[in-house]
Image (spheres, coloured by chain):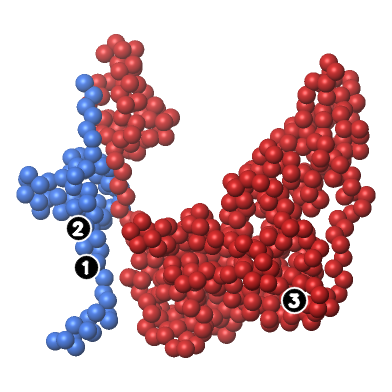
Chain colours: A blue, B red
Amino acid sequence: MVQATHGVLITGDVVLIEFIRSLNEEQPPKERFIIKDLGEKNLFIKDKKVEFVQKKVAEWQQSLRFEPKKDQQQQQQQ
Amino acid sequence: MVEGLVSFITTSVRGEQLERLFVQPYAVVAILRSLPPLARHMLLRLASTAGTVPAGKRTLADSWATSDGSSKLSAALCELAELGLLAKEPHDGQVTYTVNAGFQAQLRRTMCSGCACPLPGHPAAPVPSAAELDAYARRQWEALLLYLVNGNGTPPMAPPVLHATPIDIPSLLAAAGLMVKDECTLEQKITEHGFQFLLANLYSQLWSAVRQYLTLLNTAGGADLAVAINFLLRLGLQGAAAAMAHSQLDSAERTIAAHMCQLGLLMPVPGANELWLHPTRLAAVLAGGGRAGEAAVAPEEGYVIVESNFRVYAYTTSAVQVAVLRVFVRCDALLPNLFVGTITRESATNALDTGIAADQVVAFLRQHAHPRAAAKTPTVVTDQIRLWAQELKRLQEKNATLYDKFESKELYVGAVAHARQLNALLYSCEDRRQLVVESAFHGLMVGHLKERKQALGL
């Protein structure tokens, strides 16, 4: 019998998908969200966890940026 | 503008409004000019006849084409029929082509006498200088843009000397989708389309506003739409050079002229015993149409300087220009005649989030570049804006259904083909026999799979 599973298909570049996979590994077994790994650029995940993944990806992208003005302000405060 | 107006006529105007339009002289000329050559030729021939020409084989209409050309002839005649200019109907037992009577009469009149509008003569009042016309046009148009950006403040008013009910600018902007009314505060706020409108070039802005005005007239019904289109076509075909005398316009035209004054396209100048309406720079841009229009008129001075360290300096005193820049530039300092800012990742992504495309931002910076700045905006800046836009689209998600464990290869291949046909295929892997299809099409896929399984006997 053909099995049908509902969820969300995520597409992105290789680096991003790898990051999401490692995010999945970090979660305790109950919280893991990847239903099926569909190759280098696609993942099939649970629909309830989409916002969580988006939030984590945004945080990761933010952590890779350098904002000089903010840093200067922090130095001045210190 | 003329092409835009003709396409507006052919797509949006129907029925009685179309009949009223066909008796307007400038509309007739514009429609005739916009037809392809063969259709134009046929229309002129038919207009010179009594009005009805028998159709069908071995008749007059058929004899106009050689055996090779008869398909082209019938295609041209069909095109005329679709525009409502020609009607193919049974008449006295024979099928005939009938030209629209009003159109035919107006066409004959125009062909014989030309598009003679009463000559304005030389205005007795002093003709306003180019600077005065520019100042008036800029004042009116900027009031509109400022209202769009801020949502409060006064929209441009119609000059009281013309005694006409003005356009309701807030509802015009709301109907165009540029502003949306907040139910709680009852104030209007700018929308995503509004931001895109602000960053567009002057011709697109003017044409959107005029088009929305015509759509409102179309829905309101009445004779005003035909008169408005005729008035605008007259402005377009005459090149917006000569002044118009207010007294020579009839009452419907006077209302439209007052509305055009409110938008800044015409400037009223009271003379000795006559009120003259002078077309401004905005009217010339609109009449010229797009690039040609902007090129024909002396371009406005650019005012933005972008440095390769992402700093932006704009020499401007206009609140609208500052507001538009603030959409995607972080303001660092605002002096009476200078705006200083920086394009940061935050400011750019905020703008890109509201739906503005990176190309629009880059086009805006290029278009309004200061004449003393380098010929190009720095590639670092334009590339970085495009990269930030790409970053926002890095992760894409779609509600989908995964189909797994297909019993046979034929079933799998059939399912993939069906999904492709529905334009719903998102991912397929033949080795593992996995298929991902958009969620919305789940019902159809289930139906298809059941059918195929029965057909294959599984």
Left or right: residue B80 compared with residue A19: right
Q: Are marks 2 and 3 on the same chain?
A: no
Q: Residues within 10 Å of mark 1 (few under 14, many from 20)?
A: few
Q: Nearer the viewer, mark 2 or mark 3?
A: 3
Q: Nearer the viewer, mark 1 or mark 3?
A: 3
Q: Could you give the CA–CA distance between mark 2 and mark 1, rounded to whole angstroms?
A: 11 Å
Taking the spot 86% from the left edge, 24% from the top edge, the residue there is B54
Q: How many marks?
A: 3
Instruction: Report the disc number at residue A56.
Output: 2
Identify the amino acid type marked 1: Ser
Left or right: residue B407 compared with residue B7: left
Residue indicated by mark 3: B270
Where in the figure is residue B216, as x and y percent of width and height?
Answer: 58, 51
Which secondary structure, mark 1?
Answer: helix
Residue indicated by mark 1: A63
Q: Could you give the CA–CA distance between mark 2 and mark 3, rounded to whole angstroms?
A: 66 Å
Which chain does the residue under circle 2 lie in? A
Where in the figure is residue B389, as x and y percent of width and height?
Answer: 39, 62
Where in the figure is residue B129, as x and y percent of width and height?
Answer: 73, 82
Q: Residues within 10 Å of mark 3 (few under 14, many from 20)?
A: some
Near-viewer residue (B106 or B205): B106
CB within 8 Å, label 2 to label 1: no
Specify whether residue B280 is in view.
no
Identify the amino acid type marked 2: Lys
Near-viewer residue (B133 or B75): B133
Taking the spot 45% from the left edge, 83% from the top edge, the residue there is B339
Which secondary structure, mark 3?
Answer: strand
